[in-house]
Amino acid sequence: MKIWYIVAACALFYSGLVKAQYYQPVENNFEEIDADVDANATDVKEDNVLKDKLIDTSVHFAQRNKDLAIAKTWLQQEFSRNEGKNIVVSPLSFYLSAVLLANGVVDEGLIEFSNLFSVLRLSDVGRKINEYMYREKDSTFINVSLWGKAFSDRYQKMMSEQFGAEVWGIKESTSAINDWAATRTKGVIKKIAPVKDVAENELYVGSIAYFKGQLPLTTYSVTEENFNGKKYKVATLSAQVEADYYEDNEKQAIRLACGHDDLLTILLPKEDVDFDEFVEKLDVYNLIPEFDERGSVNLSLPVLNFDYGTVFAKNVYDTFNISRIFMKENYSFAKMVSFDEDIYLRDLFMVSKIDIGAQGTPSSSTDKKNIVTKYTFNANRPFVFIVNKGDFIGTFVWGN
């Protein structure tokens, strides 16, 4: 997986501060994800040396941070507010946003971040991100931005030199954040923030996260199938595939290769299990099953291609006892500014997009003759999906 990672910290000219540049649209590499994935569609060999390196260094996001707790909590909160909607969020982009903020706070604010994340120092985070960046395929694009009206020269320099940050200015309203998002994604995502005026002491985080994967299917068919007992049709992939498999009294689970070395896990409740209760009961212990079986699977899975935006990410911080950054009268951001001024984080605007299809040879109908499958996995009802170990997580409850 390769993350195209850009952090934008935005500032205005302020007494005693560095002269800021206002945000201007610039070229970006968002479309390279599609080009690189398509160009490598026939290359599904794993780079074992690189994979071993990733395991040996133990820098995987899931191993070094509480991403599974964040993933399940964030998903449950979004699901409770938006029942009946497809949801996808990126705990990985949430973590990168936290790194950007944590390196600008002091005292109690920093302690709160440290209690949640074990890796916050820029040097350590840089090594983590580099491990992602040197993977063979480009499947993940994450852009995280911090917006405000006054930052110190020291903070700007630190984020630029150690974190690869871009520094832009924001003038009067959050419309600049939407302009940034549209430019960065070549218009794929046009709006992530409600437009409103920005006060002098307010900070905003803007985040875009996009995962594009392809299931390595030798042959497959795409048909329009009924979903969740409803009359409307959903584009569905059908194929025989080798996969990791798990089953208990409540659910089936399958883990599929999804590109070079990305993994897609699907949690499918049994037909007699209520999906709302299933999501509510998710915890860090059952979110990623212990796959102990592998075999040929008769797979039927909807094409996943949708995006989802939230302005409630700060509620996740509240759940994990990070609160000082949202207080209007506090000096937690002392490392960001060069004067005695209280600033606070007003909102986090985060949009995630999932795009998972298939590579291989499409056919009008998959030839199932003389093929013996060990399992049947028919995702014709709501399910939970997870990319890797919590980089992205979501629910699919109806057509894209």
Image (cartoon, rainbow, N blue to C red):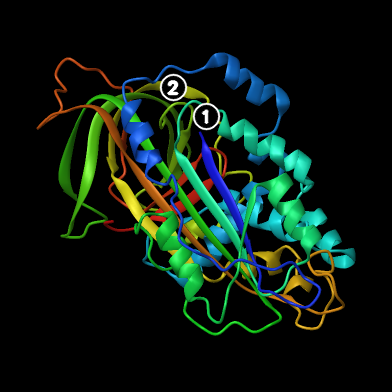
Q: Is residue 4 left or right of residue 223?
A: right
Q: Position of residue 85 (x, y in %)?
A: 37, 65
Between 323 and 124, the residue placed more toward the observer is 124
- Above or below, 133 against 70 in this view is above
The answer to which quarter of the image holds residue 360 is top left
* Nearer the observer, 185 or 236: 185
Inspect this view and state whether residue 87 appears: no
Q: In this picture, is 322 found above or below 163?
A: below
Residue 100 figure quarter: bottom right
Asked if residue 193 lies left or right of residue 202, the reply is left
Identify the residue under disc 1.
291
Q: Secondary structure at mark 2?
A: strand
Check disc 2 and give the amino acid type: Arg
306 or 194, nearer to the observer: 194
Q: Mark 1 and mark 2: span between their CA atoms?
A: 8 Å
> Considering the image in quadrants, where does the C terminus appear?
bottom left
Badge 1, how many Cα within 10 Å: few under 14, some, many 20+?
Answer: some
